[in-house]
């Protein structure tokens, strides 16, 4: 059955990601950029202040909500996953260094999109008498569309995100952790799987407060760890930094010089790779991170909207860009293995998975380079598992919480832990394709609702 379904799912993904989703996600980003009068520029400094001005890592908050920074940390944990290492490397490998330029463009517009998502998440959330907060795309979807159509779109989104992130997404993240640790340290994947299941179970059972407490500490640490490693590489390659930036801008508009083929085909490849990888790295418009922002203990939707923008900035303009600079400055410049273009012999060795390991290994040495990347993947993927599980749980509660609240949470948690363990043991291209398909499908109802609620967002933005 897998052999029969694989090409069908792959074809659906190719059509969705290359045409429908790029049009929807870029379109909604451009739309909100102009409708909010470039909120990502006007309110950027305000966002920095709201994010970092009052950080207290050991803040106490209500048991069923998060501080604004905890909500951001949980959102960033979801955004900064294996896609920042594997995704960025794949974009560069397929679309050339110029793909990074288009990632920047997409992220710029995506900051306006995620502002809209976060403000709507706060505006439409429901706070129960016991302090429980219910919020996320399903709530602003049903606000935008009343009646059966709204319930259908919300239900469609909920099922898609449970499958895409809660189950199969966490499976592929645990797979990345297990096999990178095996490569770096020789640890058997099943051992990593057991450890992941135990750690995740402890955090899942602890609820929102325990998850928030973990993410607010692990996200700054993992970001700092990765940034320091990148800066060491960039200092060692400092003479190539001007050339690296030059290549990013040059090959954004003349990609055929490095990719080969016709100008039109090469430009389409560079642009599409930059757009696709950028969109699915920062997750703006996908409907995932609004779940975290809805839980923020803030009153003003605009405040959390500006904080959410900083999440995209950190994800793309800091983490992903540093990773890209490492790859380009070590592999594409004069003495790099890709400096002479994509020869067949080189492409038989390099792929999107080991490209970044090769880049770090060129300075740190193959062994330590592999270890460094494995540790980064451990933090990135583990934090993503935690956030994605929460997002899936919120939608399980939306679908089944009224009739079977405790039972639904228990079944979901057990199933999620099972997928995490399974992911550490097996690797399947079909599972990756299914994950991408449901990821793609959840974008559609989310962006439809974002367009429909333009008036609500612009009213909030114009008052600031």
Image (cartoon, rainbow, N blue to C red):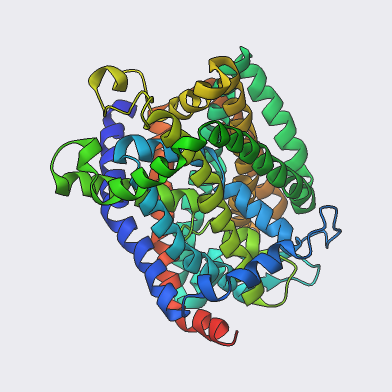
In this view, the residue in front, 53 or 419, is 53
Q: Compared to 381, does 297 lie above or below?
A: below
Q: Quadrant of the C terminus?
A: bottom right
Q: In which quarter of the image is the N terminus?
A: top left
> Which quadrant would residue 25 be assigned to in this image?
bottom left
Q: Compared to 351, does 89 lie above or below?
A: below
Q: Can residue 146 be seen in this view?
A: no
**Left or right position of 144 against 178:** left
Residue at screen point 77% across, 37% down = 202
Percent position of residue 364, x then y: 57, 22
Q: Compared to 143, does 442 lie above or below?
A: above
Q: Which residue lies furthest to the left in this view?
A: 262
In this view, the residue in front, 235 or 138, is 235
Q: Can residue 266 be seen in this view?
A: yes
Percent position of residue 430, x then y: 38, 31
Q: How many labels does the image show?
A: 0
Residue at screen point 62% across, 70% down = 45
Residue at screen point 43% across, 80% down = 35
**Left or right position of 56 against 435:** right
Percent position of residue 455, x then y: 47, 84
**Left or right position of 19 against 281:** left
In this view, the residue in front, 181 or 208, is 181
Residue at screen point 13% across, 43% down = 262
Percent position of residue 212, x then y: 75, 51
In this view, the residue in front, 367 or 378, is 367
């Amino acid at each position: 059955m897998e052999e029969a379904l694989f090409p069908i799912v792959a074809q659906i993904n190719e059509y969705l990601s290359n045409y429908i989703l790029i049009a929807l996600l870029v379109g909604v980003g451009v739309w909100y950029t102009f409708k909010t009068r470039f909120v990502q520029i006007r309110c950027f400094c305000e966002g920095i202040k709201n994010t970092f001005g009052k950080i207290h890592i050991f803040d106490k908050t209500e048991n069923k909500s998060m501080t604004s920074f905890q909500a951001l940390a949980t959102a960033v944990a979801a955004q900064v996953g294996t896609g920042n290492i594997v995704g960025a490397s794949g974009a560069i490998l397929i679309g050339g260094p110029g793909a990074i330029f288009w990632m920047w463009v997409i992220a710029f517009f995506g900051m306006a999109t995620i502002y809209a998502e976060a403000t709507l998440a706060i505006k439409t959330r429901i706070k129960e008498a016991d302090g429980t907060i219910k919020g996320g795309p399903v709530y602003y979807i049903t606000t935008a569309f009343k009646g059966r159509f709204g319930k259908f779109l919300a239900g469609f989104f909920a099922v898609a995100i449970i499958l895409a992130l809660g189950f199969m997404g966490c499976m592929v993240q645990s797979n990345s952790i297990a096999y990178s640790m095996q490569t770096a340290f020789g640890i058997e994947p099943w051992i990593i799987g057991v450890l992941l299941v135990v750690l995740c179970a402890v955090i899942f059972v602890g609820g929102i407060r325990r998850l928030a407490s973990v993410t607010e500490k692990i996200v700054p640490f993992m970001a700092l760890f990765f940034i320091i490693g990148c800066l060491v590489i960039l200092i060692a390659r400092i003479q190539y930094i001007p050339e690296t930036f030059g290549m990013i801008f040059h090959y954004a508009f003349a990609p055929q010089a490095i990719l080969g083929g016709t100008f039109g085909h090469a430009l389409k490849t560079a642009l599409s790779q930059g757009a696709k990888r950028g969109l699915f790295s920062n997750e703006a418009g996908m409907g995932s991170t609004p779940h975290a922002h809805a839980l923020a203990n803030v009153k003003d939707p605009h405040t959390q909207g500006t904080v959410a923008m900083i999440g995209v900035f950190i994800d793309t303009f800091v983490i992903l860009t540093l990773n890209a600079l490492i790859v380009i400055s070590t592999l594409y410049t004069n003495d790099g293995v890709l400096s002479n273009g994509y020869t067949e012999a080189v492409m038989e060795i390099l792929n999107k998975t080991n490209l970044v390991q090769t880049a770090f290994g060129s300075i740190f040495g193959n062994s330590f380079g592999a270890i460094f990347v494995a540790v980064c993947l451990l933090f990135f993927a583990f934090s993503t598992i935690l956030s994605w599980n929460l997002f899936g749980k919120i939608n399980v509660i939306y679908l089944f919480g009224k009739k079977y609240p405790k039972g639904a949470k228990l079944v979901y948690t057990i199933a999620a832990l099972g997928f995490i363990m399974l992911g550490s043991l097996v690797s399947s291209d079909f599972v990756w394709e299914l994950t991408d398909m449901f990821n793609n499908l959840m974008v559609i109802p989310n962006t439809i609702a974002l367009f429909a609620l333009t008036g609500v967002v612009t009213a909030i933005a114009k008052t600031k």
